[in-house]
Structures are given as C-alpha cells and as structure tokens.
Amino acid sequence: MGEEGQVKLIKGRSGMMVAVPLLRMMALFATATATIVMAVNKETHTFAVATVGNTPVKLTIMAKFHHIPANVMFVIANGLASLHCLLMLSFSFLSHKYDLKGLRFVIVTALDMMMISLVSGAATATVFIGEIARHGNSHARWNKICDNFERYCNQASGAISASYIGIFFFMVVIMVNIFKREQLNTINNSTNA
C-alpha cells in the first residue's frame, strides 16, 4: 500500500471513529427520550356519570402508561436500548486495544440488530394499541379514548416518534459498522497480497 493509500485510510478511520459515537449518542438521546416521555405519561379526568338529587356523581379515571402492557414493553425496550447505547459508547473508547481480529464488529453489529428488533417490536405494538385508542374499533365495540385523554395520546405519539428515530440511528450505525468492516477486509487483503 502506498503512502497516499495510508493517508486515505487514516482519514477514513478518523471520520468513522467520530461518526459511530456521534450516531450512538443520537440513538441514546432518542431512546432515552422515548423511555422518559412514555414512563411519565399519565392524565386524569373526572366525569359526571349521574345526578342524585342536585348533587352530581363523579367518576375519576386516570390513564397511565403501565395500564397497557404494550406501553410497559415499550418503556422496557427503549430503556434497554438506551443502556445498550451507553455500554457501546463506553466500549468504543476502551475496545481499540482488544479487537480480537475483527470479532468486535460482528458482536457489536449483532447486538445492534437485536436492539432494533426489540425496540421496533415494542414500538409497533404500541402503535397498534394507539391506533385503537385514537380511532376505536366499531366492530368490536371498542370506543376511542383519545377524545377524552388527548394529552395522554399526544405524549404517547411523541414517545413513539422518538423511538422510531432511535431505530433509524441504530440502522445507520449498523451500516457504518458494516462499511468499516468491509474497509478493514479490503485493507487486510491488499496488505497480504
């Protein structure tokens, strides 16, 4: 490999060394935001259900995220993805000494794919529940609740959006890691030749 090739390699590596942690920080921010926004999501409404004499009988209903199992899974999945991002960020600064002949890229990419699967499954389940909450289902006689708990539904929508943004950043991290691995293979092949 000539001197120009080594200079390009160093510039490419330094660019990717900055890109991956930056992308992971964006994924961390998105998944942590989704976790927090959904975990604090609650709204209370009081409804008058009857009148006894001149006194109205009121019923207070509270909507909380943990009343719906899909939302609980959503919080757990995004929390795990946030933890994964934190661990991978810390390993990215320490693991340059211990590469294990490129095995690090394979393990990290596999873990990133597992996080995408976990978060996208939880987000999709929450979207389906949100669709029923927003529009109801007349065939099953499930009434919509978002007309009464609008802030709750809007906050859940924001958490879902943040989660999908996190998934996007995880996908970009995987693409960059695959590209980086391919570059290392090309360099190793040209060095061995």
Image (cartoon, rainbow, N blue to C red):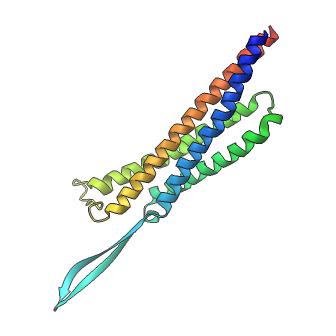
Q: Identify the residue at horizontal 34%, vertical 74% (top origin).
A: 61
The image quarter in which residue 134 lies: bottom left
Q: Identify the residue at horizontal 58%, vertical 29% (top origin).
A: 175
The image quarter in which residue 172 lies: top right
User: In this view of the protein, which residue sits in the foreground, 140 or 176?
Assistant: 176
Check the image and name the residue furthest to the bottom.
53
Q: Position of residue 94 (x, y in %)?
A: 79, 41
User: In this view of the protein, which residue sits in the foreground, 96 or 80?
Assistant: 96
Check the image and name the residue furthest to the right.
97
Q: Position of residue 119 (x, y in %)?
A: 52, 46
Q: Position of residue 123 (x, y in %)?
A: 46, 48
Q: Identify the residue at horizontal 45%, vertical 53% (top origin).
A: 159
Whether residue 71 sits left or right of residue 85 in the image: it is left
Quadrant holding the N terminus: top right
Q: Identify the residue at horizontal 60%, vertical 34% (top origin).
A: 173
Position of 102 relative to 143 (above/below)? above
Quadrant holding the C terminus: top right
User: In this view of the protein, which residue sits in the foreground, 147 or 122?
Assistant: 147
The image quarter in which residue 155 lies: bottom left
